[in-house]
Image (cartoon, helix red, strand yellow):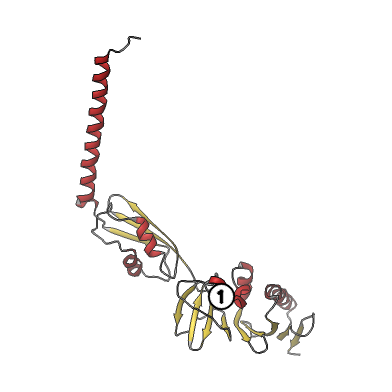
Amino acid sequence: MKKMTRVEKKKRRNKILFRLLLLFILIIIVTIFAFNSDFFNINYIIVEGNNKLDYDYIVNASLIDVEENIFRIKTSDAEKHLNKLPYVKDALVKRKLPNTVYINIGEREVAYQIKILSTYVLLDKEGYVLELSDEQVANSPIFLGFELSDIKVGESIFEKDKNINLYDFFLDDEIYNIITNMSAIIYNKKENTINIDLNSGIGVAFGPLDNVKYKIRLLDKILVDIEKKQIKCKMIIMNKGDNPILVTDD
């Protein structure tokens, strides 16, 4: 292989530099065109995954505008704005060239409600405060007699170990699935006891606010047995000794 002379090396180096310069200029031209051409203006904003939140509310919260240049938007900023909404668990914003933006929303759902005076605090399964409402939500278990401190929409009621007496009712899918059969969980602070009204009409004297998860699982087994044996039960007493007592219609 013939060894390149110094002049040949210089010519080759200059040729490479010239090509890199052309590439750099081409990139600048393409970038300027992309950021200023109407061809890349947003014509469509498509929202997916939303049930509770309506389209306009989500688009407005994202701060993305139709006719805005698609390269001028910052998807991470749009996601940050959307994730501040109480009902949004996660948000993903993507561009699809030349003119479409997709917003995918993962929503939080109302799992529980706690009545404080005349206000209903709507919560998801993690204890995240979604809304303070004047109206009760149908088909959602309601907690009565409990006290909440430092309620803030968009924050968990368990921030900094607040409201710890409610903790065992949350953050457990199995427990949540059982609680969905309850219409009301009623706390008597003076006696530190709970009574439960089930959707089936059965009342439960649940007892003290301790070993909550164990007693909820035990209650579930009792209800399964009642249904299996077709027992006409109107009340379950769990606060009189170790063995629950069934009060029947007979």
In x, y percent, where is residue 75? 35, 56
- Using the image as rendered, state which of residue 71 and residue 107 is in the foreground: 71
Q: Taking 11 as reference, is 59 left or right?
A: right
Q: Secondary structure at mark 1?
A: loop
Residue 202 showing in the rendered view? no
Residue at 48% x, 88% y is 118
- Amino acid at circle 1: Lys
Image quadrant containing the C terminus = bottom right
Q: Which residue is mark 1?
A: 162
Residue at 26% x, 20% y is 12
Q: Taking 131 as reference, is 43 left or right?
A: left
Q: Taking 183 as reference, is 224 left or right?
A: right
**Residue extending farthest front:** 6
154 over 27 or under it: above or below: below
Q: Which class describes the residues within 10 Å of circle 1: few (<14), some (14-19), or many (20+)?
A: some
In x, y percent, where is residue 165? 62, 78
130 over 91 or under it: above or below: below
207 over 86 or under it: above or below: below
Residue 42 showing in the rendered view? yes
**Residue extending farthest right:** 242
Location of residue 193 by image quarter:
bottom right
- Using the image as rendered, state which of residue 19 and residue 17 is in the foreground: 17
- Using the image as rendered, state which of residue 71 and residue 41 is in the foreground: 71
**Residue extending farthest top:** 2
Image quadrant containing the N terminus = top left
In x, y percent, where is residue 224? 71, 74
Residue at 35% x, 59% y is 77
- How many discs mark residues in the rendered view? 1
Q: Taking 96 as reference, is 205 left or right?
A: right
